[in-house]
Image (cartoon, rainbow, N blue to C red):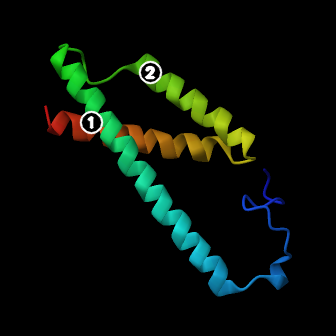
Amino acid sequence: MTRETPPNGENRKPEEMDLEELREEIQTIDQELVELIAQRTYVADTIAAVKEDRDLPTTDEKQEEQVMERAGENAEQFDLDRNLVKATFRMLIELNKVHQRENR
């Protein structure tokens, strides 16, 4: 998928698209993103509980590096800016770490 090929497979030109339809599509995507962030946070919280039970440190730099590398690779698959996607994941990781520390 590239910017020239929409994910929904539609091949309409910009002038053929209804602005309100497009905004509704963005709203749906935003909702899905929030749901995915909530799912990711739940799993991260579960990981934090396992770490606490096993007396492991909150931070795992090797794992974080792997997540960042995967994020960059996934960005390239979708013709997205690798650095922008990695920055987004860095923010998600940092938010999860703060949340984990607060709940320990």
Residue marked by disc 2 = 63
| The one of 84 and 67 positioned closer to us in this rendering | 67
| The one of 32 and 83 positioned closer to us in this rendering | 32
Local SS, label 2: helix
| Quadrant including the C terminus | top left
Look at label 1 and name its amino acid: Asp
Look at label 2 and name its amino acid: Gln
Q: Quadrant of residue 92?
A: top left
Residue lying at 36% horizontally and 39% vertically, measured from the top left:
94
> Residue 90 at what x, y percent from top left?
46, 39
Residue marked by disc 1 = 45
Q: Quadrant of residue 56?
A: top left
> Residue 15 at what x, y percent from top left?
83, 84
Residue lying at 60% horizontally and 47% vertically, measured from the top left:
84
| The one of 102 and 77 positioned closer to us in this rendering | 77
Q: Which mark is residue 74?
A: none
As measured in the structure, the alpha-carbon distance from the residue carrying label 2 to the one carrying label 1 is 15 Å
Residue lying at 49% horizontally and 59% vertically, measured from the top left:
32
Residue lying at 72% horizontally and 46% vertically, measured from the top left:
78
In the displayed structure image, the side of residue 60 where residue 74 appears, left or right: right
> Residue 68 at what x, y percent from top left?
54, 31
> Residue 63 at what x, y percent from top left?
44, 21
Comes first in the chain, label 2 or label 1:
1
Q: Is residue 47 above or below residue 95?
A: above
